[in-house]
Image: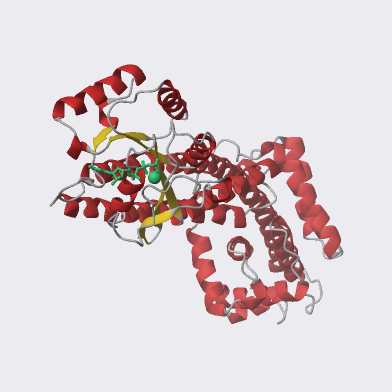
Amino acid sequence: MGEMRIMKDFRDIPIELELQVKEYEQVLLSLNKTLNNQCSDIRKEDVMGLEESINQIKKGIDRLKNLQISIAAFGETNAGKSALLNSLIGHSNEDPHAPFKVHERINIWSKEIECKNGVKWHDFNNLELILYDTPGIGGDILEHLDIAKKIASESDIILYVVWLTVRGDLQKAVMKELLETEKPLIVVINKVDTQREIEIKATKDDIQEKMGIKESCFVLAAGHPKQGEPIIEDLTENIFSIIKKQNFDLINKTIQSWVNKGVIINNIIADEVEIAREARKQKAAIIIHSAASAASLLAGLLAQGATFGADTPFLTVITIGMIVALGTLFDKKITKTAATAVISQNFGAFAGVALAKAILGWIPILGNFANASITFGLHEATGWACYLIFEDNRDISKLSEDEFKRYKIRAENMEKPNTSWIKTLPSHIKIQYDSLVRKLADKNVSDDERQGILKEIEKLTEPYRKDKSDVRNGLS
Ligand SMILES: Nc1nc2c(ncn2[C@@H]2O[C@H](COP(=O)(O)OP(=O)(O)OP(=O)(O)O)[C@@H](O)[C@H]2O)c(=O)[nH]1
Ligand SMILES: [Mg+2]
C-alpha cells in the first residue's frame, strides 16, 4: 500500500515539472515574440534586459528538463549508510553486485573516487535521482571526513545516518556545519530493528535537544535488518516530499524571478511600442488628411473646368506621395511603380473602373466627373488601407486585389484618429497648413519636394496633435 502511494507521488513529480516547464515555455514564447517584433522605438536597455531574462528562463527550463537531484548518505562509521543506500535501490547487501560496499571503507575512499560513486536511484523522464555514499566519519582515517564533507556539499539532500546516540563532539560539529548550509537534511535513525523504542527516543531527544533539529526531519529506518524486509518507506517518502517541496521550488524560485523581470520589461516595451504606434498613427492621419485635402482641392478645380492637360495624372502624384510618406513611417521605401500599382488596383476596386481612370487621368476628364468629396474619401480609404498593409508588414506590391479590398474594409472599420483638431489650429498655423496643402496639389512640385512638404506639415502640426491624451485608445 505504502509503496504504491510513494510510486504515485513519484510519478506526480515529472507531471508537475512538465506543467511547470510548459508554463515557462509559454512565457518564453511571448517574451521572444516581443523581442522579435522589436522596432526602433524600444530602448536598448530594455531589449538587453529582455534578452537576459529570456536566456535565464531558458537555462531554468533546461535545469527542469534535466533535473538531477543528488542525495548523499552521511554519518559515522558503521551507521549502516552503505547498506541503507543498497536497500533504497533494491539491492540486498549479500548481493555481490550491490553497488555500495558494506564494510569496505578502508582504502576504498580516496580523493580520486571521491564524488564518483553516484548510482541512479530513479529516472522518470526528466527527473533523475542519484544516490551518493560517503566514507564514515569518526574512524581512523582522517582524510575520510574531508571526502565525506565534499560529497555532502555537492549534494542537494543529505541523509544524516545515525545509530544510537550522536556521541562525539566531532559528529555534532559536523552536523552543525551541514545544517548551516540550509540544505534539506534528514536525520535517519538507522538499524531500528536492533533498538528498543526507549533507545530510539533517547537518540532522537539527544539530537533534537543538542542540534535543534525539527521533529519532522527525523526518520526511522533499518536498511539491512537481521530479520525481515528493510524499513525504508518513511525515508523514501520523506525524500520525495523534500524533492517536491524544496528542490523543485528552489529551481522554480530562480526561474520565477526571471519570469517576473522579463514580464515587467515586456510590459515596458509594450508601452513603448504602443506610444510609438499611436504617434505613428497620428502622423499617418495628418499625412492622409493633407494628401486627401490636396487631392480634393485639385478635383474641385477640375470640376470647375480647370485644365491641366488631359494626359497628366495629377491626382496620381499626390496619391503616390501619400503612400511613399506612409511607407516612410514604417521604414519602408516604396517605389513609384509599387505605389502606382496600389492606386490602380485600389481605386478600381473602390470607385469603379471608369471613375478610377478619370481620377488617375487615364481618360479625359469630362465635366464635373471628378467630385471633390469622393476624391477625398478615396484618398482617405487608400491611405488607411496602405497604413494597415504596412503595419502588417505586408509587401504592397504582392497583394491581390481581393486582399486590397479586405484591407479597405478593415480601413473603413478601424478606429481612426480624430483630425478635427486641424480645423481649430491657431489661425497663423492654419494659414501655413493650408498653404502647404496647396503646394502639395501643385503639379509643378517634384516627388521629393512633395515628401518634404508632407514632412513640413507633420512638423508644423506636431505640437497640436491630440495623441498624447488618448494613447491607449483604439489599440489592440
Ligand atoms: N541489524 C541491522 N544491521 C545493519 C543494518 N544496516 C546495516 N547493518 C549492518 O551494519 C554494518 C555496517 O553497515 P554499513 O552499511 O557498511 O555501514 P556504513 O555506515 O556504510 O559504514 P562505513 O562505510 O564504515 O562508514 C554491517 O554489518 C551491516 O550488515 C540494519 O538496518 N540493521
Ligand atoms: Mg559504508
Camera-side residue: 355 or 327?
327
Please tell me which residue is depicted at 68% across the width and 58% down the height of the picture.
330
Residue 55 percent across, percent down from the top left: 58, 50
Identify the residue at horizontal 40%, vertical 58% (top origin): 126
In front: 148, or 321? 148
Give the farthest residue toward the left: 1
Judge from the rendering whether residue 6 lies leftward or rightward of residue 50; answer left or right. left
**Above or below 140: residue 307:** below
The image shows a total of numbered marks equal to: 0
Residue 267 is at least partly visible in this image? yes
Ligand 1, image quadrant it occupies: top left
Q: How is the image coloured?
A: secondary structure
Q: Give the x, y percent position of residue 13.
A: 32, 52
Q: Is residue 443 above or below residue 224?
A: below
472 or 183, which is in the foreground?
183
Q: Is residue 68 left or right of residue 121?
A: right
Placement of 48 over or under 314, stated as above or below:
above
Name the foreground residue: 393 vs 228. Answer: 228
**Can residue 476 be seen by looking at this rendering?**
no
Q: Residue at x 53, y 47 (%)?
A: 114
Residue 367 x/y as whole percent: 67, 74
